[in-house]
Image (cartoon, rainbow, N blue to C red):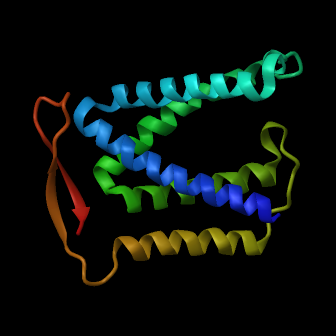
Amino acid sequence: MLLGLLFALIAGTLVGLQNIFNSKVNEKAGSWTTTTLVLGLGFMASFILGLFFEGSKMFDLQQMKGWYWFSGLLGIGVVAGIVQAIRFLGPTFAISIVLTSQLGFAVLWDSLGWMGLEKVPFTFQQFLGVLIIISGAIVFKWSEGREEKAEVIPSRHDSKAEVSKSIV
């Protein structure tokens, strides 16, 4: 379990760093260029690492269900959605919403046993945990001592700058 926690912490750190880089690339290049760079570089790096660590076993995919191949397409929505969420909400609030949504849907899919997952009963403790996380995101957004102001966030591909409300 300790190793799993360590990997989760490392992954969380890397996601946080990636989101910062992605938002900076988006400021200069636009959302689709950012998505292409992130997924393209990720493909190249994972392909090389896969060949190094797994060799030809990397291509042994006969046991995989055909519709699993589409999971890579979900990455397009993930990267593009997070880039835009950060653009309009700021990094911390956007990621708190992303993580809350991710946890909520993971609990739902686990409890329904969707997509080959082992069905796990939905408990009051799980409900309470998700509710606490949602409450934390709300408290963060509307905490005292913060005032709302309009901030212009230009994008290279926009004909005019968009005005986004952010918390400062």
Give the residue displayed 80% in from the left and 55% down from the top.
111
Instruction: Indicate left or right for 147 with 4 as reference.
Output: left
Give the residue displayed 57% in from the left and 31% down from the top.
74
> How far across and how far down the image is residue 44, in percent?
56, 22
On-image quarter of the C terminus: bottom left
Kindly give the residue lying farthest to the front in the view shown.
52
> How far across and how far down the image is residue 163, in percent?
15, 49
> How far across and how far down the image is residue 118, in percent?
88, 48
Kindly give the residue lying farthest to the bottom in the view shown.
144
**Nearest the eye: 118 or 36:** 36
Give the residue displayed 39% in from the left and 62% down from the top.
93
Give the residue displayed 46% in from the left and 56% down from the top.
95
> How far across and how far down the image is residue 58, in percent?
78, 21
On-image quarter of the N terminus: bottom right
Q: How many marks?
A: 0
Instruction: Indicate left or right for 111 with 36 as reference.
Output: right
Compared to residue 132, the image places residue 108 above or below, namely above
Compared to residue 140, the image places residue 106 above or below, namely above
Please identify the quarter of the rendering in which residue 70 is found.
top right
**Nearest the eye: 50 or 70:** 50
Instruction: Indicate left or right for 108 with 14 as reference.
Output: right
